Image (tube, rainbow, N blue to C red):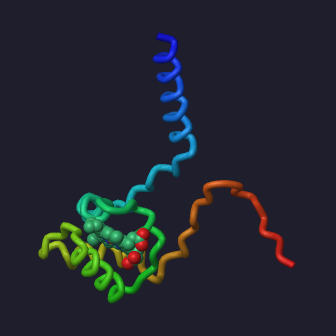
């Protein structure tokens, strides 16, 4: 009986540790008419941050979307151009640079000599 309880306590402790150390939840993609479709098709294999951090031209987004489709992204042919436009508008080269979140020591300074 006691062993069972110990196991249960250990399991709960392990789950809590995972929750505490997990990366913060993936941020939502920006609002817009294509938000839902892009979220569905483009966060199936990886989370949103890999998209949020890009700053690409329209030509580069076209290549990127085509590559992801080749890899299995479910983008309807009639939505292809709207995907590229949504991504170029929100993550184009004219957007301010992405600021990466830090997992630890957010104020740690790198000493430069
Ligand atoms: C079938 C799985 C899958 C789907 C669906 C998918 N991707 Fe990817 N994507 C990948 C893989 C695999 C990588 C490479 C991952 C890595 O480097 O960590 C990647 C990487 C990326 C990158 C980083 C640059 C690069 O080319 O490596 C971007 C940007 C990206 N995907 C955008 C998208 C967009 C936009 C969509 C929706 C149209 C999408 N992905 C859907 C599998 C997918």
Residue 73 placement, left or right of 54: left
Q: Position of residue 49 (x, y in %)?
A: 45, 63
Residue 88 in sight here: yes
Question: Who's the residue at 52% across and 23% down the image?
Answer: 9
Quadrant observed for ligand 1 in the rendered image: bottom left
Residue 90 in sight here: no
Q: Position of residue 108 (x, y in %)?
A: 76, 60
Observer-nearest of 38 and 112: 112
Residue 70 placement, left or right of 20: left
Q: Position of residue 14 (x, y in %)?
A: 52, 34
Residue 11 placement, left or right of 64: right
Residue 109 placement, left or right of 90: right
Observer-nearest of 2 and 13: 2
Placement of the C terminus among the 4 image quadrants: bottom right
Question: Who's the residue at 47% across and 82% down the image?
Answer: 94
Question: Who's the residue at 25% across and 63% down the image?
Answer: 41
Q: Residue furthest right?
A: 113
Q: Residue furthest top?
A: 1
For residue 69, above or below residue 23 = below
Question: Who's the residue at 66% across and 54% down the image?
Answer: 104
Q: Where is residue 53 in the image (x, y as percent from the top left)?
A: 48, 71
């Amino acid at each position: 009986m006691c062993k069972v309880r110990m196991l249960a306590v250990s399991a709960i402790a392990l789950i809590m540790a995972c929750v505490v150390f997990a990366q913060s939840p993936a941020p939502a993609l920006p609002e817009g008419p294509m938000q839902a479709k892009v979220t569905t098709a483009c966060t199936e294999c990886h989370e949103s941050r890999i998209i949020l951090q890009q700053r690409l031209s329209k030509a580069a987004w076209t290549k990127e979307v085509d590559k992801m489709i080749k890899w299995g992204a479910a983008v309807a042919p009639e939505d292809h151009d709207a995907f590229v436009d949504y991504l170029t508008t929100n993550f184009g080269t004219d957007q301010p640079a992405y600021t990466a979140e830090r997992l630890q020591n957010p104020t740690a300074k790198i000493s430069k000599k």
